[in-house]
Structure formats: structure tokens, C-alpha cells
Amino acid sequence: MEKLTNKEEEIMHILWKLEKAFVKDVLAEIKDDKPHYNTLSTIIRNLEEKGYVAYYAYGKTHQYYPIVSKEDYKKRFMTVAIDNYFNNSYKNMVSFFAKEEKISVDELKEIIALIEKTK
């Protein structure tokens, strides 16, 4: 899976939400910093070249849909992030969020319960 730019990732989130969409549909979903229609079309074609989306052709119009699931992308993204930022240690990642007060004791207890349940 090739790495996505921030804008490509934003577009993928829209496509995952919509499931299939024309460029105009994607454009309508962008709230801030709307790109020009042609720019967005180029971004979506780049996603196609990278193997993230495919399309149905209706004459000269294309309806795009994701071929990489959000779950598969999330797994890849998280694996790379944990490797790059936390020395491939999930403990380091959880400790980071605990120190930053981004995760509560109750949430940690829920995670522990989940882990124990899967054993």
C-alpha cells in the first residue's frame, strides 16, 4: 500500500463514508479549503493509480468507489505509526496517551478487560 498525502487521505475518508461518488459528490463533502474541481479530479485519479479506488464509467463520467477498506488502511497506518513513533511498542504508545491525558483510567480498564476476554 503506497503512502497517501494528507489530502488524499481526506478524500479517502469521504469515499469510505459515501461508498461510491462522483467528483462533484466528493467536492460537496469538503468543508474547508475546497480544491478546484479539476484539482480534486486529479487527486482522485492519483488514488486510482495508487490502487485505493476504482470507478464505474458512465460515458465520460466516472463514479469512484474505494477498493481498500478503511479497516485495512487503519491497520497499515497504525502499524507504521507505532513502528515509527513508538519503537514498535504498543506499551510505549499507550503510555504516551496516558501521559498526555488522552486516555482515562476507565478506558485503560476497558482495554485490559478486552485483552483478558480474548485470551
Image (cartoon, rainbow, N blue to C red):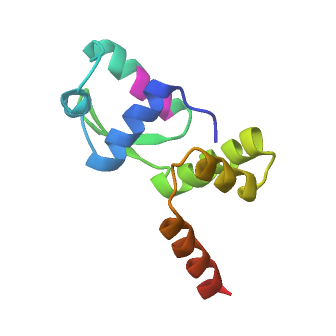
Question: Residue 70 location, x and y as percent?
Answer: 46, 52
Q: Quadrant of residue 112?
A: bottom right
Part of the protein shown in magenta:
43-48
Question: Residue 32 location, x and y as percent?
Answer: 26, 21
7 over 1 or under it: above or below? above
Question: Residue 82 location, x and y as percent?
Answer: 70, 47
Quadrant for the N terminus in the image: top right
Question: Residue 51 location, x and y as percent?
Answer: 54, 39
Which residue is at the front of the view, 25 or 82? Answer: 82
Which residue is at the front of the view, 67 or 71? Answer: 71
Q: Residue at x 25, y 40 (%)?
A: 21
Asked whether the viewer can see residue 55, the reply is no
Q: Residue at x 59, y 49 (%)?
A: 97
Helix, strand or loop: magenta stretch:
helix
Quadrant for the C terminus in the image: bottom right
Q: Residue at x 27, y 18 (%)?
A: 34
In this picture, residue 43 sits left or right of residue 57: right
Q: Residue at x 42, y 23 (%)?
A: 43
Which residue is at the front of the view, 27 or 106? Answer: 106
